[in-house]
Every structure is written in C-alpha cells, then in structure tokens.
Image (spheres, helix red, strand yellow):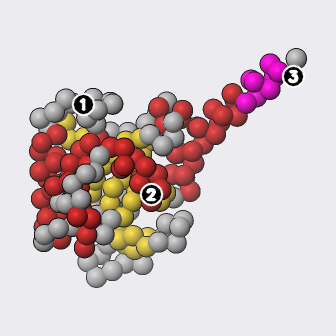
Amino acid sequence: MADADGAEMMMNFHGDFLKSDRKNGRFPHCIVWTPIPFLSWVLPFIGHMGICTSSGVIRDFAGSYFVSEDNMGFGRPTKYWKLDVDKVCGNGVATWDKAVHDASEEYKCRPHNLCFDNCHSHVAMALNLMRYDNSTSWNMVNLCVLSLIHGKHVSWAAFLKTWLPFLMLCGVITTFILTLNLQ
C-alpha cells in the first residue's frame, strides 16, 4: 500500500507500520542497529548503531574520521527503535535533523575507539544535542540497553541474522561441554 508521496507503507513482523522506502531502507526518526560479525555472535546485545534523519537517511560513525550516509558499516539495519519527534526540544523535525547533522560533522573529526568513542557515542551526541526527552545524559550504555529493550526487528530474516549465530555458538559450546562431561 502506498501513501500520497509514493512511499510504501510496510508492516513488519511486529504488526507496526513504517513509512518506508523498501529500496533504500528508510527509517525516519529512528535509531537503527545491525550485528557486528563475531562480536555480536558472542555478545548479541552489542552491535553497530546509527541514527536516521527525518527523511530516513541513516548516519553512522563507521570508522575513524568517517560518518557513513545510507551505507551502514556492517550492513543493512536488522533492528530499529522508532523515537517520538515530539520529544525533541525546539522545532521538532528541524531540530532533529540539525542535531543529526551536527553530531555527524563532529564525528567526522574523531578517531574511532571501540570501547570509549564509537557509533553509540555518535547517536548519543545527536540525542543530547536535540535534548531528546528533555535529557542531555544519553550515552552508549543507556542506548545499548534501551535499544535492546525497545528495538524491533525489521523482519524475520533480520531476527535470524541477529540471533542465529549466537544460538548456534551456544549449541556448539553446549554440545562440546556435554560431550566432555558424558565420557
């Protein structure tokens, strides 16, 4: 089903409707997440995060001095967390887009550090700049937890891409432990 401006309304497997552009994977006013190979297989709550503009363009801190646009560092988003633009302090959409832009410009000048200044920090800066939910205390830890709680998978295939490697690894380890203990 399409709306007046030609964007397609898509229902995800949670029954939510997203105003999306299937070809380009648009998620307006969302935080998006995708697994990082090997790291997410062991710790499935850790992954790569980006933030989308009001038009759904994904911005993510993909490496030192580089903020990607619509080409996430580890592939297409598997999860999204829809935020409420009405919780932005100021002029809603304009403030949102300016904050995403300003955070991206700042992170184009920073080295990437996996533990201390990473893609989650980039998203946190954007939320702090827009004073989302009247807060300036967004950080990578609360974003990781809240994204895990509020994030919704884009599709069943995305769900499998996120969780199947972890579950397979758990199965291999369990089989190995049981094999050793049963002998």
Q: Which residue lies under the disc numbered 1? A: 112
Q: Which residue lies under the disc numbered 3? A: 182
Find out whether residue 54 is within the magenta segment. no
The magenta span reads 174-182
Pointer 1 local density, CA inside 10 Å: few below 14, some 14–19, many at least 20: some
Label 1–label 2 contact, CB within 8 A: no
Label 1–label 3 contact, CB within 8 A: no
Main SS of residues in magenta: helix
* The label number, if any, that marks residue 151 in the structure image: 2
Residue 170 visible in the shown view: yes
Which structural element holds mark 2?
loop
Q: CA distance from mark 1 to mark 3?
A: 46 Å
Q: What residue is rendered at 57% in x and 45% in y?
A: 163
Q: CA distance from mark 1 to mark 2?
A: 24 Å
Name the side, left or right, on which 28 lies relative to 107: right
Find out whether residue 181 is within the magenta segment. yes
